[in-house]
Amino acid sequence: MRQTLRRIYHHLGLVVGLALAITNSLAAPVDTGDARLPFLRIPRAAKPPVMDGTIHDGEWAGATRLTNFVHTNTGALAQEQTTLWLTYDATQLLLAFRMNAFCLDPVSNMTAAFKATHRKQDEKVWEDDSVEFRLERWGEPPTTNYYLAFNANAAVLDMAHRGTWDRAWDAGATVRARRDDAGFWEAEIALPLANVSGDATVGTAWRFMCTRFEQRLGERTSWTRLVRGDHTNPANAGYIVLGGASTAVEVLPLTEATLAKGAIPGAVHAPAPTAIAWQTGLYQQSKLRFIRDGTIAATAAETPFTATVDVGGIRRTGAESFQLCLSQPQVGLLYRSGRLPLPSGSATATLTAHANAPLDIYWNGEKVSANVADVDALKLKLQPGANLVAVRGPVGVELAGVLECAGGRFPIDTTWRAAINPPDGSGRFRMKK
């Protein structure tokens, strides 16, 4: 029997208050001066994606792409991450979401943890792993707060707040969703602009808030940390603005290894060659300590970049945070992140295992020990979010051991679930039916 897999989680340090004052040429009223709030300029789709619930490769390449959702209260990076794409066409706001979900990974054999079975309109979708977003047209009184929530079965709750909640309001949205046995579920949504007090005019803007409710771990996460964790307060919302043929920003997942070096990876998709300015601010205990800036020579295609945070001049305490801004001379601010954590340093787990036959041990899909029966205090570097350990041995192997991490001890024995295929570099494992 091949013995496999358990997940453990590592929380990054908490985030403290952040307010990055960045100079930019944006004069539109959507830039309120509250630089703690995130900002997105959304490019118009050259070819709108097909709303079928499957995020095909390259289909959303020209959209703004975000990840690194954080806990609404603490600001720590989510264990089950969410990725969000945004673009629009002549009549619709187009959104795509991908939600990591361990209960959908075959190695966990926990698909029953997904309770959603209903498809009826206006069900209590928040009782399952679900996502909600809220839109409020900027600068267009009277103010109406539009709300839409959905789950993996495309069950929808939509309503509008005009002093009181109006459940009769219909977003008119197309919502398609699916589950994937690679460990995620995803959804694509087309929302008529006219139904949220807008149109496709460049510069049209909304206050925007997006929150995920993950049930297995009880995580409530968002694209930015929220004051008092309040996902219902419009004052916590950031801004999205329609940008026409503007540059799309792709924010890549943060890792402890890159952040420890002060590196923030990303990419831009420009419609024509242009210069993009980036700026980062490092904060410690709500106080601005360092600013760094630079320029991206963007081509008329995807251009990767690495912005840097000045982490060399401070003692890392776990109370650091940073913010990234990108701007373009022709249009102004393109992207401003919310509050993102900076880890205090490398964290490790320790694995000890003993067996009556040689074993192969994999950590996050990489082989770290080969053909040995005894592993004594093997140090394993933790990455943000989920970490995967797998032990492979012959049928009938007797195995005992312990994985120590963050003050916890996780026993390793032959009660671990069995997989058909051995681990490989992809980090994916298939369960026996």
Image: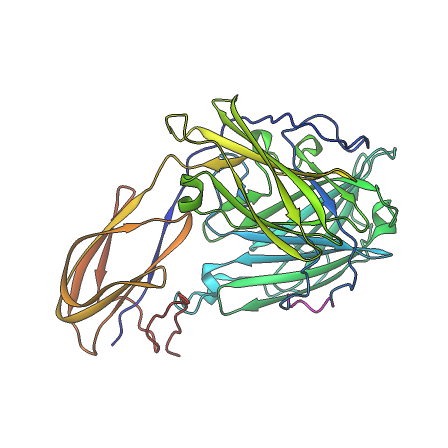
Locate residue 204, reporting x and y percent: 84, 42
Residue sticking out furthest to the top: 287
| Residue sitting nearer the eye, 282 or 304 | 304
- Whether residue 165 can be seen here: no
Q: Quadrant of residue 53?
A: bottom right
User: Is residue 366 found inside the magenta-colored segment of the image?
Assistant: no
Residue 40: tell me if it is visible.
yes
- Residues 247 and 15: in front is 247
Residue 62 percent location from the top left of the image: 71, 57
Q: Would residue 416 appear left or right of 206 to someone viewing this image?
A: left
In the image, residue 14 sits, relative to residue 370, either above or below, namely above
Quadrant where the C terminus lies? Answer: bottom left
| Helix, strand or loop: magenta stretch | loop
Between 71 and 40, which is closer to the camera in this rendering? 40
The image quadrant where one finds the N terminus is bottom left
How far from the left and from the top, in percent, is residue 206?
78, 40
Colouring:
rainbow
State the image quarter where residue 342 is shown. top left
Quadrant position of residue 426: bottom left
Q: Residue at x 32, y 42 (%)?
A: 347
Q: Is residue 275 above or below residue 125?
A: above
Q: How many marks?
A: 0
Q: Is residue 160 above or below residue 216?
A: above
Please report the bounds of the magenta region as a residue range.
Answer: 50-55
Residue 358 percent coordinates (x, y)? 16, 71
In this rendering, would 203 be left or right of 339? right
Q: Judge from the rendering whether residue 334 lies leftward or rightward of residue 394; answer left or right.
A: right
What residue is drawn where x is 65% and y is 47%? 297
Residue shown at the point (42%, 47%) measured from the top left: 384
Q: Is residue 315 left or right of residue 322?
A: left
